[in-house]
Image: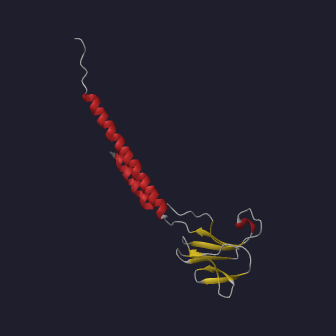
Amino acid sequence: MMRGIIAVVTGIGLVAAGCQVDTHLTNVAELSAKQMTVRSAPWRGDFRLYSIPPNTKEPLDQVTKPIMIVHLNKGERVGFLRRPDGANVAVAGAQEILVSPGQYTWVMQADAGQTDPVKTTILVVLIVVVVALGVALIVVAVDVGHAVHDIHVSPVGF
């Protein structure tokens, strides 16, 4: 009984805590000859604008320094757009920064402690499925045990 209570309390704590957002550096928007987008910031965190050096294979933070770092809230604008006069600008929240021709990227580092609702939902569904399967196996085992117990073997030929 005590194990069941501990399992339930642990499960509730795990679901209440949820799955946290990944805080590793992630590209969120690029400016290139083919691509230019503005999107909503997926999480609250620091957004770093980099100029991408040609033929770069290493992570940007090891090759070059960011042009700027902006802290944005989830849902604020981040990306690149072209003004009516043809100028390219990097967008971060209400800020617009003129950028010269070239390739650029916004890299996000989400603030720690944010709960990812998609990962948390997957976790909850997984827990429910595992518990349901466990309960079903126990019910089947108990039914089989009762059926075996109820079978009476009578001696043959006596």
Question: Horizontal and vertical percent for residue 36?
Answer: 64, 75
- Foreground of the two, 79 or 93: 79
- Foreground of the two, 78 or 18: 78
Q: Residue at x 74, y 75 (%)?
A: 102
Q: Which residue occupies the extreme right position in the image?
A: 54
Q: Residue at x 57, y 76 (%)?
A: 72
Q: Which residue occupies the extreme left position in the image?
A: 158
Q: Residue at x 70, y 64 (%)?
A: 59
Check the image and report above or below for 63 versus 137. below
Q: How is the image coloured?
A: secondary structure
Question: Horizontal and vertical percent for residue 111?
Answer: 56, 69
Name the quadrant containing residue 138. top left
Question: Horizontal and vertical percent for residue 66?
Answer: 70, 73
Q: Residue at x 51, y 62 (%)?
A: 20
Q: Which residue occupies the extreme bottom position in the image?
A: 85
- Foreground of the two, 62 or 3: 62
- Horizontally, residue 97 falls left or right of residue 10, namely right
Q: How many marks?
A: 0
- Horizontally, residue 38 falls left or right of residue 7, namely right
Check the image and report above or below for 76 versus 137. below
> In the picture, which quadrant includes the C terminus?
top left
